[in-house]
Amino acid sequence: MAKKVLVVDDENTVRSLLKIYLTKSGYELDFAEDGIQAMEKIKSFDPDIVILDTNMPGKNGIEVCAETKAINPSRPKIIFHTGSLEEYKAKAEAAGADATFAKSGMGGLGKLVELINTL
């Protein structure tokens, strides 16, 4: 059975790119455009993994990560960030993220798939 992945990002271009790449990798996908919508999708879609953008309107990815941890601590969460890893690593870990992945370049999507498969 394919892993269910919820991608949460306010940028349509990023969601579209991840849809193409992750669908080809065999995942069942759903999407949210902001943190508030993400919390609704987490309840209705019940994803195996949640990929969260850090900077979004409403609730940011760190806030959603912490709330998701409170609901289901074992659900893997990946913080998908711009900027340097050092900038987000401590915040992501404190919020309960299982991993972080840099958006910069977007050329490393194969590494994102590897990361999803290890969680």
Image: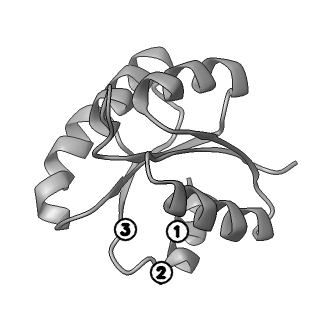
The reply to whether the C-beta atoms of the residues labelled 2 and 3 are less than 8 Å apart is: no
Instruction: State the residue position of label 1.
Output: 112
Viewer-proximal residue among 37 and 5 = 37
Mark 2 is on which residue type? Gly
Left or right, residue 70 beside residue 29: left
Counting residues from the start of the chain, the first of labels 2 and 3 encountered is 3
Residue at the spot 57% in from the left edge and 19% down from the top edge:
40
Mark 1 is on which residue type? Leu
Density class for disc 3 (Cα within 10 Å; few <14, some 14-19, many ≥20) is some
Tell me where residue 35 appears, x and y as whole percent: 41, 29
**How far is disc 3 from disc 1 in space, using C-alphas?**
10 Å
Colour scheme shown: one colour
Q: In which quarter of the image is residue 64?
A: top left
* Disc 1, SS: helix
Instruction: State the residue position of label 3.
Output: 103
Left or right, residue 79 beside residue 51: left
Residue at the spot 30% in from the left edge and 46% down from the top edge:
54
**How far is disc 2 from disc 3 in space, using C-alphas?**
9 Å
Counting residues from the start of the chain, the first of labels 3 and 1 encountered is 3
Q: In which quarter of the image is residue 48?
A: top right
**How far is disc 2 from disc 1 in space, using C-alphas?**
7 Å
Mark 3 is on which residue type? Lys
* Disc 2, SS: loop
Q: Given the current orientation, which residue lies at the most extreme front position?
A: 12
**Residue 108, numbered circle:** 2
Residue at the spot 25% in from the left edge and 44% down from the top edge:
92
**Residue 24, numbered circle:** none
